[in-house]
Image: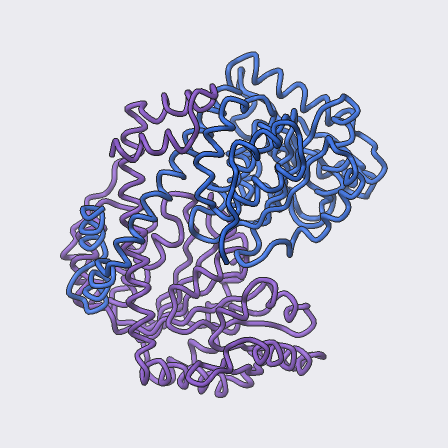
Chain colours: A purple, B blue
Amino acid sequence: MARRRVDVPVLVEAAREGSPRAVARLITLVEGAHPALRDVMAALAPHTGRARIIGLTGSPGVGKSTTTNVLVRAYRERGARVGVLAVDPSSPFSGGALLGDRIRLVDHALDPEVYMRSMASRGHLGGLSWSTPQALRVLDAAGCDVIFLETVGVGQSEVDVAGLADTTVVLLAPGMGDGIQAAKAGILEIGDVFVVNKADRDGADVTVRDIRGMISLGDRTEPGLWRPPVEKLVAEQGEGVDAVMEALDKHLAWMESNGVLHERRVKRAADEIEAIALRTLRLRMGDVSDGSDVGSLAGDVVAGKSDPYTAADALVASI
Amino acid sequence: MARRRVDVPVLVEAAREGSPRAVARLITLVEGAHPALRDVMAALAPHTGRARIIGLTGSPGVGKSTTTNVLVRAYRERGARVGVLAVDPSSPFSGGALLGDRIRLVDHALDPEVYMRSMASRGHLGGLSWSTPQALRVLDAAGCDVIFLETVGVGQSEVDVAGLADTTVVLLAPGMGDGIQAAKAGILEIGDVFVVNKADRDGADVTVRDIRGMISLGDRTEPGLWRPPVEKLVAEQGEGVDAVMEALDKHLAWMESNGVLHERRVKRAADEIEAIALRTLRLRMGDVSDGSDVGSLAGDVVAGKSDPYTAADALVASI
């Protein structure tokens, strides 16, 4: 399949003017690791840095889509342009097993000021850490004031999301053993705001108390550190949205007041640069590999004539 | 914490003689990415290449531990030395949330010819693709004839495991919607042998038929390709173990007869070499980063004065 020619300046200009088609097309380029991305990102760069990125993660069934939905509405009521990027870590092959409930965001499907997009993580070559920041950059340059980065809390993905967001919201629900799960999966370390959704159900107060208790046991209560609030929400009914919005506002104000926001963004840019650099190096190794250098090194390792470290040294020397 | 000095020749010799303590210690070095690994792997190299590696993956609840247990027993009855490496992709912070049932392997806990080990994946720096092959190398050099590499089927991990194994067993259970899951998650592509466990439950035949149907729709029925068998098992009762063992034997014989086994191992060694090389390059970037090159590049990107590709080029040029 021949790649369509990409007219970068036209596409970037259209995206900046808010064309949903242009935004969608640019994110498709990101997903496909298109060669034109280099020019795209250079053209977008001066227009980035405005969007606030809010990561939202939680186990399947806690109500991520419904929660995103009500928060999008709240930001829309403030007049903000909003992006939603849903990343599905469940499948390297195709999009969407775990995000089948995406359909619920249909509330905003006809709102031209809301951009929604699902992305599948792309297996090995770069993966989430490579493609997601670039998709966020597209939405940022398209004038989004707020971007929700939503992912299901499975494996490494929630930690990755926390690394990409200004503020990370960890969503829980009563009676799912989430308290214990949180402690195990390191969710406690990554959450800036904890939200107990479905708070009209039995056990909501217990979950809130559990999470508060675990936070107070950690080192996050020291002076100067952000102490993550734990809010109750009934997203289906829209109850508790104001409190969550207030927590998000407070976290933003806190980060702006002490330079943490800038620090996080520099850290994130450094990670992004590193991911692109690693991909470049990896592709070079691939070239070497086609030239069978790696093949013969690997043959020696299989035969027990060499070991992988010695072979890796030879590979690094060759690129 | 000061690192204990490692006497590589003594440790390697002890591991080769089958000391479980020495094997455990070497795998701990792998988990900790110890600097001595370079010498360890060089010393182990001539003694590797004998073990057959069987990957075993499936959703939580399908009975992975029980199945591993009965298969370990079957190989022990043949007089084989057996290794079990359980990799937990669920947590970058600590071992074991999803592998809590590890305790069931206690059947073999006192058998000196069975090595068991759980490993947590280590977050970003190398992760599964870096540490697992080296742990397998340790077990291989320790004289294991068969090594089970067990992982829960979540996200990318099952695909990673398939890349590390000679034979990949995909475990399913009736009534878990696994058929559809399999199609979505790409399990169909990675399985060499499908096992429907808990086959005494309702719906087992439906699951078997579903999987067979999906296999026959794929391209795996072409002449010369391996057509994955679908076997029924009741691991708790030990029913069906012979059929599974026969399927494993057949797959091995098939791979040996046509060179696929060697091909897979060369491919795996190439991946391993590449992972080590990438880690080396990454560490070099880290050094550069400490010297604040990356920091100032990232600052420019955040300020919109540069874009991540241009910055990545500068980073690659500097290492």
Residue B189 appears in the rendering: no
Q: Nearer the viewer, residue A28 or B128?
A: B128
The C terminus of chain A is located in which quarter?
top left
Residue at screen point 62% across, 20% down: B252
Residue drawn at x 57%, y 41% is: B27
Q: Tell me: B100 left or right of A108.
A: right
Image spot of residue B229 (x, y percent): 66, 26
> Of all residues shown, which one is farthest toward the top?
B257
Location of residue A87 in the rendering, given as x and y in whole percent from the top left corner: 44, 58
Residue B52 lies, in percent from the top left, at 61, 25
Looking at the image, residue A297 sits to the left or right of residue B77; the answer is left
**A278 up-or-down from A206: above or below:** above
Q: Is residue B62 above or below residue B98?
A: above
Residue situated furthest right in the rendering: B237
User: Which part of the image, by quadrant, shows the N terminus of chain A?
Assistant: top left
Q: Which is nearer the eye, B277 or A78?
A: B277
Q: Position of residue B144 (x, y in %)?
A: 65, 27
- Up/down of A267 relative to B150, above or below: below
Residue A190 shows up from this direction? yes
How many marks the image carries: the answer is 0
> Where on the picture, by quarter, is residue A46?
bottom left
Instruction: Name the residue rendered at 61%, 29% in the picture.
Output: B142
